[in-house]
Amino acid sequence: MAASKSLVRSESGKVRRVIVVGGGLAGLMTVIKLCEAGVPVDLFSLVPVKRSHSVCAQGGINASVNTKGEGDSPQVHLEETVYGGDFLANQPPVKAMCDAAPSIVFMLDRMGVPFNRTPEGLLDFRRFGGTLFHRTAFAGATTGQQLLYALDEQVRRWETVDVEDDRGERVAGEKMVRKLEWWEMIGLVTDDEGVCRGIVAQDLKNMSIVAFPGDAVCLATGGCGIVFGRSTNSVINTGTAASAAYQHGACYANGEFIQVHPTAIPGADKLRLISESVRGEGGRVWVPRDPKEQRAGREVPESARDYFLEEKYPGYGNLVPRDIASRELFKKCFHEHRGVYNRESQRNENEVYLDVTHLPREILQKKLAGVLEIYEKFVGEDPFVNPMRVFPAVHYSMGGLWVDFDRAANGSLVMGSPRNQATSIPGLYACGEADYQYHGANRLGANSLLSCLWAGMVTGPAIAAYRKNVARSAWDMPSSLFEKAEKRERKAFEAILALDGAENPYALHDELAHTMLVDCTIERDNATLDKVLAKIEEIAERSRRVGVTDTAVGKMNQGAQYVRHLRNMIVLARVIALGARNRDESRGAHFKPQFTQRDDANWLRTTMAFHKAGANGENDAVRFVRAVDYTLLGQRVEVKDEVDTTLVRPRPRKYETAGAASTAAKG
């Protein structure tokens, strides 16, 4: 297939741009790498870029720099990552990520990220869950904010740089980055061959709907925590863009794997994260030994405290992986009814103590001030003198849009291959929490920021290679292709504005979220999941009879926008719950008391789901497959659901003894 003649201009003379949707770490890094490759970008963001959900990350970013001389290395990082993910992650992308991690942290340091340092001036590293090594670089307890602001500055620089044509001459009025904030991607533009040629987006300030050409599209739109209602996620994290792509034909993978973070505080609007870094700096989890204990936490003597994680997992203590810690907290509160006593309700609540009162105040202020301030502000108690009261909360989606990778001979990735991070829709890429690639069945803490940045570093060159070799630019496609997609989405939005049914979309979401949160998170039971699926179908049917709460035209309309998000969340809830119902084993964050063991013989494979639209008024459905078959740049690609475990042999996953993860992984 012959590539387009010019990499800068279309045949009609227009500048050939690509589209990145999402202004968090993954999206911004993708933009940076594309600009470095000379590819102009249109960057779309649902909110101002500096308010992207990456800003909420607290604890740090992993990199095996080994400044403390503990014997850590990228190889150990690889082993512990795939071990912590219960061997469900394809290992070549993980190896590439772990190998690149030290250079990524050093790059961020050069960008000006104010990482904490040792007295000698070296980067400081703390411990996080699932490892015995000090591997997590951090900027106090606001690491995500510092990283996001650093990358935002880099992208702002590219907003001032002129596009150059093939002869190196500046193109008047064309900048390398055009930023469109307060725009929501609501649909894809695909041609007759199914190739992605752009997006349809809505300006949330005036609700106008416009189709935008793009030689390739990257979705870096985060997770779907709001499917479960209140979570540690921002309220924008409904998964709506990934759901739209899935409904357009993209494969969704491992949707059933949802991470529940062990420590968060409740709130009327969301559940606020209390970072794993608190435990990494010495915070201890406990409940009173006596279930009838009514004294305040600071008044309970040491002898009357049950440090249950330390007693059951002496090797890792409070820093076991999140899936294990969350189940143990859940067990103490729900099965043993040993939560923290509440004087107002006069009963034990679903809370445990996270205690830092034994640690020096100056250390806490230096390393944890940001997160401790959050606790004091929203709970009204001083965590320096009162043990914090916490409970698990939905936090992260290991599943997401299925993306491909191109394995190199050394077991890593072929950098620059257009297969890397490619979805099953040619020309559509995904990275960050929106993809499923790097964490398997459970994500280790502080690997999220790393995976976002690394995936962006992979996606940029992959899109540049794809664009270089595509036969026809999106900017040379007939205008009717974009007009048709624009008309389709306008019609859909007008239909929402016309809804006048009796159902309240916000109440429907509350029902959906409550069902998913109670019956499809830490413990899953098949009979209960059948009821969850029935409830999802009921809500899907009722969602057709909602009444839109705002019918305004020509100005911001959050009521109509919310109806679209609700429908897309229902679609993802079905994928998550049905995937959980089908997977009869326990692996990572997916735990079934009926099937307590991991079943590698039947389930060491990726769950691959495609959308099946309902016909004649029926609800939509999910079609599961054992392989993805797609065409990229004229070449047929088939990828089966088998997981690449050739670098680290799968072994039973245990954390009771020190070093269990790396020892077992090495086999």
Image: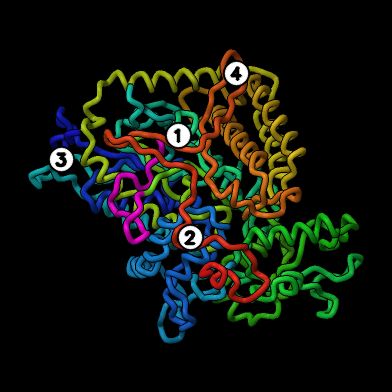
Which element carries disc 4, helix, strand or loop?
A: loop
Q: Which label sits on residue 250? A: 1
Q: Give me the residue at 58% from left, 32% from top.
A: 571
**Residue 286: image location, x then y, percent:** 76, 70
- Examine the structure image and report whether residue 411 is included in the region drawn in magenta: yes
Residue in the picture at 33% in, 34% down: 631
Q: Any mark on residue 499, and which?
A: 4
Q: Which mark is residue 558?
A: none
N-terminal-most mark, 3 or 1: 3
Mark 4, other Cα within 10 Å: few <14 / some 14–19 / many ≥20: some
Secondary structure of the residue carrying tag 3 is strand
Q: Which is closer to the viewer, label 4 or label 1?
A: 1
Q: Do the numbered discs 2 and 1 sit on residues whose CB atoms are within 8 Å? A: no
**Can you name the residue that lies furthest to the top here?**
616
Query: For the residues marked 4 and 3, what is the alpha-carbon distance in whole angstroms?
Result: 45 Å
In the rendered structure, which disc, 4 or 2, sits on the residue that comes first in sequence? 2
- CB under 8 Å between discs 4 and 3: no
The residue segment tinted magenta is 406-425
Q: Quadrant of residue 101?
A: bottom left
Up/down of 553 relative to 603, above or below? above
Q: CA distance from mark 3 to mark 2?
A: 36 Å
Between discs 4 and 3, the one toward the N terminus = 3
Q: Is residue 57 left or right of residue 349?
A: left
